[in-house]
Amino acid sequence: MASVYNQQFRVVHLVRSVGPTSMPWNDLYGTARGLSPGIMYPVVAVQTKFIPIRWGWAKNGRKLCRYWQGGPFSAIALLVRLYRSQVRSNRQLILNVHSPILGSLAWTAKLFCPSMIVVVSLHGEWTRFFWYQRLSLKMGVKVCDSLITVSLAILESIPQPIRMRLMKNNGLVAIRNGIRSSELDNIYPVDDLPVDRFMDVVVVARIVDVKNPFFALRCFAKLKFARNLIWLGDGILRSKLEKYASELCISKRIHWLGTQPRDHVFEALHNSSVYLSCSKSEGIGVANFEAAALGCQPFLSDIGPHREIAGILDLETFPLDDENTWVQAIDNYLSLKVDERNVNAATLAQKTRSAFDLNNSVMAYIDVYREVVELAQRRGS
């Protein structure tokens, strides 16, 4: 695809951290650099410690890429330096903020960079944020030119006065996350999915309360046909969850793999039959798409973002107050004949790769960047 970079702007992403499944780092930053070379500055990861800006290195897909990391004051100083560089080059600097707690930092940076364009990306439901996150987010929204949510469900969670004001100014849009469909097509072709998958259940989630990990273990413990549970992810509740698994007498059937590169996540999903997401709240959940795109049947909790996915992929969602409903549905699926599961897996994989292609998502972001720059230029003239 030809580059859409037109020398009018550059984008810098403000995040709390980079990681192997981080959407701003792996999906947006990495993919946009390929689709539109020269459009992106390195990502800025803001830490709580008051330390100077320095370079960090992390895997972005299969590449080792550098990013800036530093404390809040040094991050603002860096943004001012980048802003002045763009002004001298007669270009716009776009600051894309990806964490609610960094909204106040964007508001502060705007004081020193008056013509800087601010885009806020919302990856979680407004109602699930703590009061201090909402306060900081409101500060960011006050100076933002566009707010992008990663699902329609998140868009609808924004308080109505804020939502109406943004919509009135054409500053509110929903862009769903996506998956690297072309990469999956090369490595895991739809017509070459496993004929006889392991009867394993996969969870890809941080081990924190919002992901509902204890509920997931109770569901697994009651399944008749499942063999093992593979848990990809780590978190503050891991030791308690391991103890709970011991109480349920399922410890020997659980593989705690911790945080893994995406390739390892793909492999686990590709070889397993069931994917489980019992989350109380989500943004949109890229792992949900990846599971479906690899033919690993998703069983999703009945929350707004999951209903959005389910509606597109003809899936069901399940209540968070009745684990027996989950158990029955999963056992029913695992009891199907192998041929039936294979047909389901291939159909689901093809539909998911078509509906949630990452290139389309990233191009939609780039379109928003171009629109806000054009609008700023019209205001300036």
Image (tube, rainbow, N blue to C red):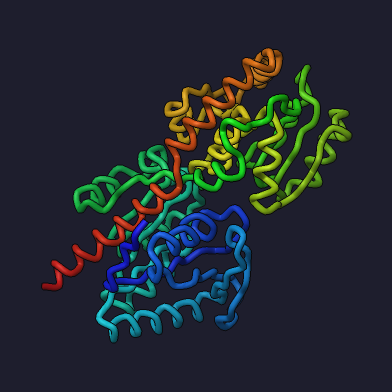
Determine which quarter of the picture holds residue 322: top right
Of the pair 10 and 223, the residue shown nearer to us:
10
Q: Report the quarter where the C terminus lies.
A: bottom left
Q: Residue furthest bottom?
A: 88
Of the pair 296 and 377, the residue shown nearer to us:
296
Q: Residue furthest left?
A: 381
Q: Is residue 215 visible?
A: no
Left or right: 23 in relation to 92: right
Please provide percent x and percent y for residue 93. Answer: 33, 73
Q: Is residue 22 visible?
A: yes
Q: Is residue 149 above or below residue 193?
A: below
Residue drawn 31% across and 61% down?
369
Of the pair 89 and 247, the residue shown nearer to us:
89
Determine which quarter of the picture holds residue 41: bottom left
Please provide percent x and percent y for residue 277. Answer: 61, 34
Residue drawn 59% across and 70% down?
48
Give the total number of marks visible in the rendering. Answer: 0
Q: Is residue 256 above or below residue 44?
A: above
Please provide percent x and percent y for residue 141. Answer: 34, 58
Left or right: 360 in relation to 17: left
Residue drawn 62% across and 15% down?
340
Of the pair 41 and 101, the residue shown nearer to us:
41
Please provide percent x and percent y for residue 36. Answer: 38, 63
Q: Report the quarter where the N terminus lies.
A: bottom left
Q: Is residue 245 above or below residue 175?
A: above
Residue drawn 27% across and 61% down?
370
